[in-house]
Image (cartoon, rainbow, N blue to C red):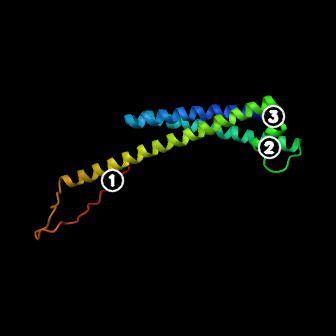
Amino acid sequence: MINELIETIGKEAAIFESFLQLLEEQQQMLVENDLEGINRVTDQQREKLVQSQLLNKKRLQLIEAIKSDGNIDGDLNVSRLLKIVDQNQADRLQKLQKIILTLNDKIIEVRNQNAMLLNRSREYILKTMEMLSNINNPKATYDSSGVKSESKNNVALDRRI
């Protein structure tokens, strides 16, 4: 059962790695403003998330089975698991743990970068919409007394596309 758990964790690591590649691909699509590519990559990310959820469920079932077979109380994390497995299995588990933690850090970094790109894109769109709304209705910067006028235009956007 331990070997099956290690195999499942290895599959999870592979999915995380492919998810990271998809995030990096998505980042490139965001930079290139490739909407079709973004949609394609997003669909692939959803598939990876479903696969990850299935493997997570299997991993949790295996952990519960190992706990019941070994009469182990409480959480069975990698540290506790390392104490009950042989050295070869322990080495593989430690290696997988390091890989998954590294991938997780990289995934967080790329996701944050992608979120920043999306937010900047939204800001540019908003500024463009504000400028477009002022084209046919320019406002004077100063009123007749020479005081700077503070006027803000509301931008209406029809999202029924």
Numbered mark located on residue 157 in the image = 1
Numbered mark located on residue 142 in the image = none
Residue at the image point whose x is 86% and y is 46% from the top:
72
Amino acid type at mark 2? Arg
Numbered mark located on residue 80 in the image = 2
* Residue denoted by label 3: 2
Most extreme residue toward the left, as rendered?
A: 144
Distance Cα–Cα, label 1 vs label 2: 56 Å
Distance Cα–Cα, label 2 vs label 3: 13 Å
Is 122 left or right of 1, judged from the image as shown? left
Q: Nearer the N terminus, badge 2 or badge 3?
A: 3
Regarding mark 2 in the picture, which secondary structure is present there? Answer: helix
Marks 2 and 3: which is nearer the front?
A: 2
Q: Residue 70: which quarter of the image?
A: top right
Which quadrant holds the N terminus? top right
Amino acid type at mark 1? Leu
Regarding mark 3 in the picture, which secondary structure is present there? Answer: helix
